[in-house]
């Protein structure tokens, strides 16, 4: 395959991402951390050592920034993510036998994010500064409500309204990073990220369309809110070691602070029957929320085998200390009203990636990630990564894709009074993320 054909194929895949899949129901609780990557590092499974001399390394292992050459690089990134969430329950006949799995909800939505950063290096140190979209809290769930107008009506089962959950908001990050060498084989790095939240919205409830007695109770109101003052900070520390000319290792830690928002109606808690998180709504009050997020520790390696065509292998092990995770809700007097502290055990992630450069100079990149979920092993997730790139003089373009699919069981989000179900809903998640990164060397 020629370079032109390969890049064209990947661009087509990115442009069609809006018709593909995913879901982030627990993300608003701070329970789904999607790290920022460049197009190249995303294609290689998110390995920190795949960010050599790239400003995004300041968000992972800042020691990877270090380079002994003089350079000034402008970096931009466009990220597209698309999602589908389907929920269904088994249909049974009058004898209780299984007939089919009925999908009663199919929601899809998209996210678009952008980043801008600058990288500078000279003999002895390297530095970067960047403005990134760190978290995108967008989530839209909509479920139709049907109503029976009675036997005399011509139209049976009319649309009466919608069950709706809506989250939105962006957490931007201003990242400053510095790296320097220690001797010939070691480099250390430090970075600080200040988080700024904008555009926070939430809503939960029922939006009626028809006047129906079934929709007149107090729980049929849709409660919207606009939150303010999203804020927080991260500190990243890193070390890289050149063990041999072909083998490099890296250690890094992401030390995260508390993230806070003001003015929420929606509280996170634990569903005792599922032992999984759940949302509750307090329509009469608003609260200030603080999320104590978990620290992440990583060990990564990069190996270049002896091969006629340049090939590089990557691997990384991440450990996320979920024992410290907690969400606190405070009233206007700054008194603690509710604390969600599920005491999860630490969770781990394994990343693997391969980059193979053909004779034409076109790279093929492949990655695989397996994530252990802190809430339930049923939610463990496997992700496939793929991508390529193109270099022309001072311009470098990288493209990466990540695709996943998984399934778990959960309660009906809006249960019908007195309705009995033999089993939990089956929730099917599919997602795709595409990164297009462009770097220009001055």
Image: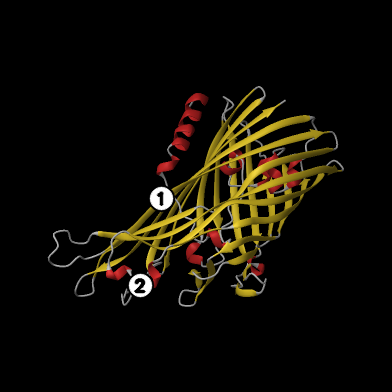
Residue 102 drawn above or below residue 419: above
Identify the image quadrant of residue 101. Answer: bottom left
Estimate the x, y position of residue 170 in percent, counting from the top left.
Answer: 58, 50
In front here: 304 or 432?
432
In-image side of 353 versus 106 (left or right): right
Q: Is residue 304 visible?
A: yes
Q: Is residue 324 left or right of residue 282?
A: right
Viewer-closest of 345 and 260: 260
Which residue of the protein is positioned furthest toward the right in this rendering? 183
Query: Dot 2, crowdedness within 10 Å: few (<14), some or many (≥20)?
Result: few
Of helix, strand and loop, which one carries label 1? Answer: strand
**Which colour style is shown?**
secondary structure
* Quadrant housing the C terminus: top right
Residue in view at x 64 percent, y 44 percent: 132
Instruction: Identify the residue at horizontal 14%, vertical 62% (top origin).
Output: 153
Residues at marks 2 and 1, CA–CA distance in whole angstroms: 29 Å
Residue 293 in which image quadrant: bottom right
Compare marks 2 and 1 and give the one earlier in the sequence.
Answer: 1
- Mark 1 highlights which residue? 108
Q: Position of residue 404 (x, y in %)?
A: 47, 51
| Residue 303 seen by the camera | no
Q: Which residue is mark 2?
A: 217
């Amino acid at each position: 395959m020629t370079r032109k054909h390969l890049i064209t194929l990947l661009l087509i895949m990115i442009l069609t991402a809006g018709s593909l899949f995913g879901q982030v129901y627990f993300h608003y609780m701070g329970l789904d951390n999607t790290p920022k990557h460049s197009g190249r590092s995303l294609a290689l499974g998110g390995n920190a050592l795949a960010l050599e001399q790239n400003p995004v390394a300041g968000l992972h292992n800042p020691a990877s920034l270090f380079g002994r050459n003089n350079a000034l690089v402008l970096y931009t990134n466009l990220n597209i993510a698309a999602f589908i969430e389907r929920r269904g329950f088994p249909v049974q006949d009058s004898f209780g036998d299984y007939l089919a799995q009925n999908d009663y909800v199919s929601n899809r939505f998209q996210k678009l994010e952008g980043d801008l950063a600058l990288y500078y290096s000279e003999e002895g140190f390297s530095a970067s500064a960047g403005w990134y979209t760190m978290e995108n809290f967008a989530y839209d769930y909509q479920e139709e409500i049907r109503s029976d107008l009675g036997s005399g009506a011509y139209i049976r089962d009319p649309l009466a309204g919608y069950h709706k959950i809506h989250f939105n908001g962006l957490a931007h990050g201003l990242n400053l990073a510095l790296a320097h060498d220690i001797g010939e084989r070691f480099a250390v790095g430090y970075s600080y990220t200040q988080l700024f939240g904008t555009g926070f919205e939430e809503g939960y409830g029922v939006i009626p369309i028809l006047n129906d007695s079934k929709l007149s109770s107090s729980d049929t109101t849709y409660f919207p809110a606009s939150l303010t003052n999203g804020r927080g900070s991260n500190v990243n520390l890193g070390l890289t070691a050149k063990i041999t000319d072909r083998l490099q290792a890296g250690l890094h830690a992401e030390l995260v602070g508390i993230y806070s928002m003001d003015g929420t109606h929606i509280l996170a808690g634990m569903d005792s029957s599922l032992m999984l998180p759940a949302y509750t709504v307090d329509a009469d009050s608003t609260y200030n929320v603080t999320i104590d997020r978990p620290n992440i520790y990583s060990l990564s390696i990069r190996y270049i085998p002896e091969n006629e065509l340049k090939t590089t292998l990557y691997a990384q092990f991440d450990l996320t200390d979920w024992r410290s995770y907690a969400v606190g809700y405070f009233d206007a007097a700054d008194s603690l009203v509710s604390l969600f502290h599920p005491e999860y055990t630490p969770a781990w992630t394994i990343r693997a990636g391969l980059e193979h450069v053909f004779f034409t100079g076109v790279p093929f990149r492949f990655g695989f990630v397996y994530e252990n979920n802190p809430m339930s092993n049923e939610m463990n997730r496997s992700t496939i990564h793929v991508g390529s790139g193109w270099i022309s003089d001072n311009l470098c373009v990288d493209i990466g894709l990540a695709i996943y699919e998984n399934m778990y069981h959960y309660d009906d989000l809006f249960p019908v009074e007195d309705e009995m179900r033999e089993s939990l809903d089956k929730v099917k998640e599919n997602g795709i993320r595409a990164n297009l990164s462009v770097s220009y060397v001055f």
